[in-house]
Amino acid sequence: MRRLEANTIIRQGVNILIYFFFIYNVSFVFLPSILRTRVLLGLLGLFFFVSQKKIEMPKSLGHIFLLCLTSIFLIVLTTVVNSYFDPRFIGNTLQNILYLFGAYYLAIRVNLNRLYALKLIVLSIFLHNFLALLMFLNPSLLEIITSLQSTGDKFEYALGNVVKFGTRFIGIGAGTFFSGGIISSIGTMVAAYIIDSLKRGKLWWILVYIFICITGIYIARVAFLGIFLSFVYLVISYILKKNYSSFPKIIIYATVFGVIAFSYLAVNLDSLMTSNSFRHSFEVFINLFSSGELKTDSTEGVKAMLIFPTDLKSVLIGDGQFYYDNGSFYMHTDIGYSRLVYYYGVFGIMIYFSMHFYILRYNIKRFKDDKCFKLLLWLLTVLLLIGNFKGLLDINWIVFIFYWLALYKIKLENENLSYYK
């Protein structure tokens, strides 16, 4: 019995680590930089996929491959027209194919159990943010972990400034700066879905949710967006379920938490204001109360970098450039939409987001009776669309997991119904 329990715990731990490395896409110094952990898991997933006794190609998978080929065609087109080759998105497209099979491996690891997969996603993000907190408190640990990663000169420079001034938590792999805040946002939203779905055992997930909310803000302030969208999810889900009997309990919990948080801030505000990390993370609220303006230095920078081309050719198919030769961003903009349109135009932007919307539609058709899950999918889409006003973003890693779970849902629930669509 004890051996069985130990094996279960070990398997759970291994699953969390596998999901962790898929989500955070770590590049280790002892491996070639191209072999990030998400790529390695993609190769493993591809091996398992082609090792099936009978390989069957669903139409939906063919459609995803077709979208990838269309993306490559647009890249070739803008390259030929502009006589300039920037391979950034060809590599991105090929990586997405591997990420798709990495997600396949993650789906079969959990026996196609959607709720279990979502729990592993949240626990992986919880683990990462806990490590980020420990590294913030212990710079020696931060130095050890970053020394194991291949990060690049730009990251090293930014990391040095962050460590020097102590303005934010540093994560692992993709868990730092903007991408880390987005992943934390996804964690809060998925945790809200789990809390809403469970009938028992909610307390642990509520604590996990709160922890990811707080630590996510210290990683990147874009995590506020995820917190807001998670609240939107809970409110709309509550209305959809018409579970009005639990309203008094929600009010009590919210009041108790609010009183505790307000009391803590009131007692410790002076000491918190001396913390660079607190001032940076909550700059928007500090500015609001001190000057009445809802802004940060970052939002002002976004306004300056939100630029678009004016000539028709660049608008339609872009300039074919993502970076300058010195490695800086083309047109000196870090805004997702601006970088995409300058690279391969509005047609490229449509293709860039098409994979997400295709899988969104696919999941909505497969889970048409699950209103709360569809709500989560739509809010993740809102996160994607808003997030690209701050930086270049896709969340394909999680929608790929949803794709495989939706695809095989039909096979498992009704063997007589064709799922090759």
Image (cartoon, rainbow, N blue to C red):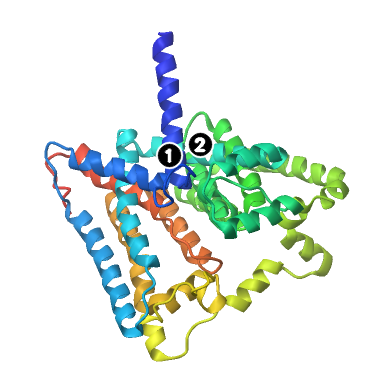
- The residue wearing badge 1 is 19
Tell me how many marks there are: 2
Whether residue 259 is visible to the viewer of this picture, yes or no, is yes
Q: Position of residue 23 (x, y in %)?
A: 45, 46
Q: Quadrant of residue 61?
A: bottom left
Question: Going from the N terminus, do you reach mark 2 or mark 1 first?
Answer: 1
| Residue 131 occupies quadrant | top right
Quarter holding residue 244: top right
Asked if the residue under mark 1 is in contact with the one under mark 2, i.e. CB atoms within 8 Å, the reply is yes
Between the residue at mark 2 and the residue at mark 1, the CA separation in whole angstroms equals: 9 Å
Q: Is residue 197 visible?
A: no
Residue at the disc numbered 2:
123
Placement of the C terminus among the 4 image quadrants: bottom left
Work out which quarter of the rendered image holds the N terminus and state it.
top left
**Kind of residue at badge 2:** Leu
Left or right relative to 58: residue 90: right
At mark 1, the secondary structure is helix
- Residue drawn at x 85%, y 44% is 268
Q: Amino acid at mark 1?
A: Tyr
